[in-house]
Amino acid sequence: MADRIGNKLTEEGDGPPKLSYWHVWADDDGVTHQTLCELSAFMEKSVGGKAAPEWIETLLTAKANLVFFVQPVGWTGDWHPNPKPQWLVTLSGRWFVETMDGVRVEMGPGEVQFGNDQTTKPDAQGRFGHLSGTVGDEPAAIMSVQLEGDEWIGLKPCCFK
């Protein structure tokens, strides 16, 4: 099993920043994977009024639900797909996601993931989707933006720029 930890924000001089995120996805055979991707289409502009310009990326517009999860210490969610395509941002604590290919990623505060494994299929061991759970001795609080609509299901890795 491969272990990977974290994603990050990088700035390159005066140019736009890059924000990495983990994309959990299923291949054509239904096997899930995690790919580290980057958001990089930031544009410098003001949010309005007299606010100074800042780096902004409007990634998508869609009907969505805002959901908060709190995973108790020691919590493990058995193998399952994401309920809907969803952006997940860790607010506090640490948690992990393990995909069918054996990759395990641990995330902490400020780290981002796009969960998009709804097209997963059970393997010979009965696993499908991903396994997730808390890491350490504190609960993990996670904010999720769950996207409505079939156009978000089955996206390939790093489709968001």
Image (tube, rainbow, N blue to C red):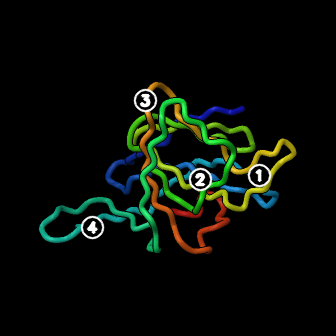
**Contact (Cβ within 8 Å) of mark 1 with mark 3:** no
**Kind of residue at badge 1:** Val
Give the mark toward the camera: 1 or 3: 3
Please tell me whether mark 2 sits on a helix, a strand or a loop: strand
In primary-sequence order, the first of circles 4 and 1 is 1
In primary-sequence order, the first of circles 1 and 3 is 1
Q: Which residue is mark 1?
A: 31
**Relative horizontal placement of residue 88, taking residue 127 as reference (left or right):** left
Q: Which residue is mark 3?
A: 138
How far apart, in angstroms, are the residues tagged by discs 2 and 4?
27 Å
Please tell me whether mark 4 sits on a helix, a strand or a loop: strand
Q: Which residue is mark 2?
A: 23
**Can you tell which mark lies on residue 45?**
4
In primary-sequence order, the first of circles 4 and 3 is 4
Picture residue at 64% right of the left edge, 47% below the top = 34
**Kind of residue at badge 3:** Glu
In primary-sequence order, the first of circles 3 and 2 is 2
Picture residue at 55% right of the left edge, 35% below the top = 75
Residue 105: x and y in percent read: 59, 38
17 lies above or below 125: below
In primary-sequence order, the first of circles 2 and 1 is 2
